[in-house]
């Protein structure tokens, strides 16, 4: 399973070849989201294992872009990543989900420690 960290996504986000797909519920997306991301509010369906609910949103996903899926903490987005991978997309999950993105934006101690530990493991 491929994943991408918030810092790497932020570096690549300005490229036209990255498409951020946020699967959180519409209200959560409205409250806060990664700039220029696209909302496909199928979080609850994915949690239930209904990955085909994502198919209704595939028209918005470009075939020629790397797709990064986002949910609240990165767990449910993995289901979207698996489904999109099966459909032939180049796709990864945002490590830590939107919560991880917020930690990155705020440059919190938690984010810095987690990034350091990930660096040791890789």
Image (tube, helix red, strand yellow):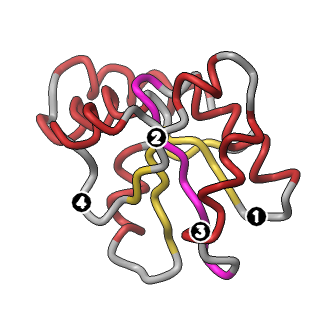
Say whether disc 4 or disc 3 marks the residue closer to the N-terminus: 4
Image point (27%, 51%), residue name? 34
Q: Are marks 4 and 3 in contact (CB under 8 Å)?
A: no
Instruction: Kindly identify which numbered label has been placed on residue 78.
Output: none
Identify the secondary structure beneath mark 1.
loop
Disc 2 to disc 1, C-alpha distance: 19 Å
Instruction: Kindly identify which numbered label has been placed on residue 35.
Output: 4
Instruction: Categorize mark 2 by other alpha carbons within 10 Å: few (<14), some (14-19), many (20+).
Output: many
Instruction: Kindly identify which numbered label has been placed on residue 61.
Output: 3
Q: Quadrant of residue 64?
A: bottom right
Identify the secondary structure beneath mark 3.
loop
The outermost residue toward the left is: 106
Residue that label 2 marks: 41
Identify the secondary structure beneath mark 4.
loop
Disc 4 to disc 1, C-alpha distance: 22 Å
Residue closer to the observer: 36 or 96: 36
Q: Are marks 1 and 3 in contact (CB under 8 Å)?
A: yes
Residue closer to the observer: 14 or 25: 25
**In the displayed structure, would residue 88 be above or below residue 1?**
below
In the image, which residues are magenta?
64-73
């Amino acid at each position: 399973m491929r994943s991408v960290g918030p810092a790497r996504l932020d570096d690549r986000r300005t490229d036209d070849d990255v498409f951020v797909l946020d699967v959180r519920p519409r209200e959560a997306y409205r409250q806060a989201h990664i700039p220029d991301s696209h909302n496909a509010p199928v979080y609850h369906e994915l949690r239930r294992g209904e990955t085909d609910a994502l198919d209704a949103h595939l028209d918005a996903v470009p075939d020629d872009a790397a797709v990064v899926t986002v949910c609240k903490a990165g767990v449910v987005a993995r289901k979207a990543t698996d489904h999109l991978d099966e459909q032939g997309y180049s796709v990864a999950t945002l490590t830590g989900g939107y919560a991880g993105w917020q930690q990155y934006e705020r440059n919190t101690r938690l984010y810095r420690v987690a990034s350091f530990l990930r660096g040791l493991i890789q």
